[in-house]
Image: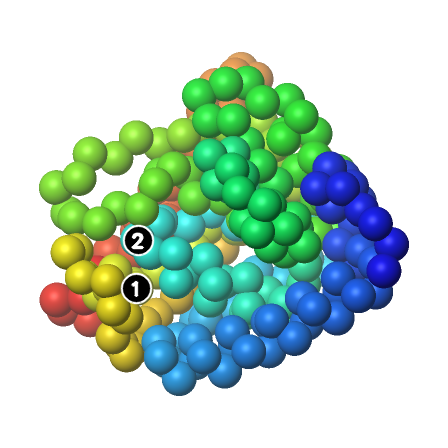
Amino acid sequence: MAHWSPDDYADRGMREFPLGSRMVLAFVVAVLWVFSKLMWRWRMQNADELLPEAGAETGSIIICNHTSMAEVVAIYVHEYTHGRRVRAIAKSEFYRTGIVVWLFSRAGTIPVDRGTADMRALRRAQHALKRGEDVLIFPEGTRIRTDDQPVEIHGGFALMAQMAKASVAPMAVCGFRDITPKGKHIMRPRTCWMRAGEKLSLDDAPASLKRRDRLQWLEDEGMRRVYELRDALQAEHPGRK
């Protein structure tokens, strides 16, 4: 197997990864597909909304609410098994131990230094999108474990969309928070739901807005649609979060 550094995995296309790494990833995804389907019984509603538009060569930025690490697995597995390659944006704090760096790099994750203008991460995401890979972002920045937990939206995906001329695909999850309730450490089998919404882009912003305001519009409207999808799922499944 060719020796690649973590930077090589972040900078090169996922379909260019060394054969050994791609075989390991395919095996892990297969195992996670079986495990997650048995444990969480998830399915993606409106899955076609995540597929590229006809003739599109650029990938999409998937934005989603964040309640559990389980939904990261489910979204990744769904994308991979539908022929898509997705790169999750992960906070650099995860990259502190060798085994995590090894796993995350081979999964195609892009580390980002939160709270800074991390142009290296933005450029990596831009290049990934230009290659046709999708980028997965949780703008809430951390898992929202309770309804009264303060939520701070971390911007950036609109700038990323502008740089790559990419669309934004809002989606939402429901039920994953109940897999491991607060204060518990053992997963429980639970049915969970995921739903994708209609894509949007900077072209959808009101023409009267200035450049910076158009970016803010995309971030606000993107998250509004995420929460609209989340609220609809929660209304259809009372008591589930």
Q: Quadrant of residue 55?
A: bottom right
Q: Position of residue 226 (x, y in %)?
A: 37, 49
Residue 171, above or below 20: above
Residue 3, above or below 217: below
Q: Quadrant of residue 238?
A: bottom left
Q: Are marks 1 and 2 in contact (CB under 8 Å)?
A: yes
Kindly identify which residue carries mark 2: 67
The answer to whether residue 57 is seen in the rendering is: no
Q: Secondary structure at mark 1?
A: helix
Front-most of 227 and 26? 26
Q: Residue at x 58, y 22 (%)?
A: 118
Q: Residue at x 59, y 45 (%)?
A: 98
Front-most of 198 and 57? 57
Q: Residues within 10 Å of mark 1 (few under 14, many from 20)?
A: many
Q: Quadrant of residue 5?
A: top right
Kindly identify which residue carries mark 1: 176
Instruction: Compute the Cα span from label 1 to label 2.
Output: 6 Å
Q: Position of residue 178 (x, y in %)?
A: 22, 65
For the image, the number of numbered tags is: 2
Q: Position of residue 57 (x, y in %)?
A: 78, 51
Instruction: Say which quadrant the N terminus sits in.
Output: bottom right
Which label is found at residue 158?
none
Name the amino acid type tagged 2. Thr
Q: Secondary structure at mark 2?
A: loop
Q: Position of residue 213 (x, y in %)?
A: 48, 19
Q: Residues within 10 Å of mark 2 (few under 14, many from 20)?
A: many
The answer to whether residue 60 is left or right of residue 232 is right
Name the amino acid type tagged 1. Phe
Instruction: Say which quadrant the C terminus sits in.
Output: bottom left
The answer to whether residue 169 is seen in the rendering is: yes
